[in-house]
Image: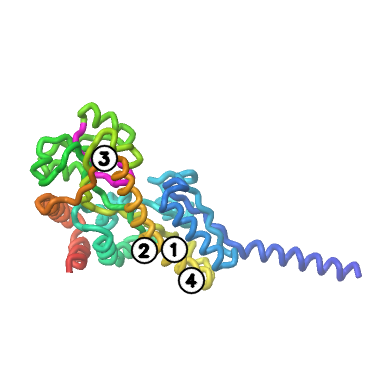
Amino acid sequence: MRLISSVLTAAFVAGSITAASAQTKWDMPTPYPDGNFHTKNVAAFAADVDKATKGSLKIVVHSAGSLIKHPEIKRAVRQGTAPIGEILESLAANEAPVYGIDSLPFVTTGYDSAKKLYAAQKPYLEKQLASEGLILLYSVPWPPQGLYAKREITKVEDLKGLKFRTYNATIGRIATLAGAIPTQIEVPDLPTAFATGRVDVMITSASTGVDTKAQDYLTHYIDTQAWQPRNIVFVNKAAFDKLTAEQKKAVQDAAKAAEERGWKASREEMAIKTKALKDAGIKVLDPSPALKSGLAKIGETIAREWVEKAGADGKAMLDAFRK
């Protein structure tokens, strides 16, 4: 009897160990806070995976850079320190040109064309990630970027000589091509910079305008839909390969749902924040034909410069987009 009891106990312990080892936990670093629509989408993705795998694969989301800071997330996933992560795609543009195509200005003109650009880019994006031992799961855009000013801007020539807020090289190039004066200003300094005349115009999203109370220092928002930077969610291939067939399918299905849900959420975010600008007293305008034409020419110049760096693949992506 004692022998039977010992055998049963050993069997129970072995079974418990097997059950415990059957559960896989993935820590997922993300750069934005819990209230951000991208992070909410990631949380829903993780919940979908948990449900579909009956808890055998748990993705624990670490938001706001709490586990790994934004600039280090991609490297951490590549090295296997974290199995899965999310970044702003263009943050990696210095590693390979393909990561920067979504942030070429005045190439896309809204969500439909942004989705077409993504479709043209996707095979090359997947190829680049694969060369780094990574697998693309999904990509979701931010709301489009618009032009803010203290008066209506009806043509590119209206920007000549104005101090144009910049925060990266591409926007500095836009300013230079428009004949404006590039001026580096960080988001927290925007109200003071505009109030004191250090800067006259800027390109950013409706969300940033709402967050910084643009109505206190600006009067016009021209909805140029200049570009739509995207976030990408990707997984370490070695970690993915260790999953069961059922778990892999659950991750891929959840990723497909997250991409669809994320694009919808981005559209909603744009509508909510644009309405908030109007409600705050900002004049929200569509760009005039002359302004659209002038900005498009600037975009063509910057796109040509990008293709020179990106080579044949870059040309193929833009050609496919423009068909």
Q: Are marks 2 and 3 in contact (CB under 8 Å)?
A: no
| Residue 169 visible to an observer of this rendering | no
Mark 3–mark 1 distance (CA, rounded to whole Å): 34 Å
Q: Amino acid at mark 1?
A: Lys
Disc sitting over residue 130 in the figure: 2
Foreground: disc 2 or disc 4: 4
Mark 1–mark 4 distance (CA, rounded to whole Å): 14 Å
Foreground: disc 2 or disc 3: 3
How was the colour assigned to the protein in this rendering?
A: rainbow
Disc sitting over residue 249 in the figure: 4
Q: Are marks 1 and 4 in contact (CB under 8 Å)?
A: no
Q: Dot 4: few (<14), some (14–19), or many (≥20) neighbours within 10 Å?
A: some
In reply to whether residue 132 is colored magenta, the answer given is no
- Residue at the spot 23% in from the left edge and 43% down from the top edge: 283
Mark 3–mark 4 distance (CA, rounded to whole Å): 40 Å
Mark 2–mark 4 distance (CA, rounded to whole Å): 19 Å
Residue 38 at what x, y percent from top left?
A: 41, 53
Mark 2–mark 1 distance (CA, rounded to whole Å): 8 Å
Q: Are marks 2 and 1 in contact (CB under 8 Å)?
A: yes
In the rendered structure, which segment of residues is drawn in magenta? 199-209
Foreground: disc 3 or disc 1: 3
What residue sits right under mark 3 in the picture? 167
Q: Amino acid at mark 2?
A: Ala
Q: Earlier in the sequence, mark 2 or mark 4?
A: 2
Mark 2–mark 3 distance (CA, rounded to whole Å): 30 Å
Q: Earlier in the sequence, mark 3 or mark 1?
A: 3
Residue 11 at what x, y percent from top left?
A: 77, 68
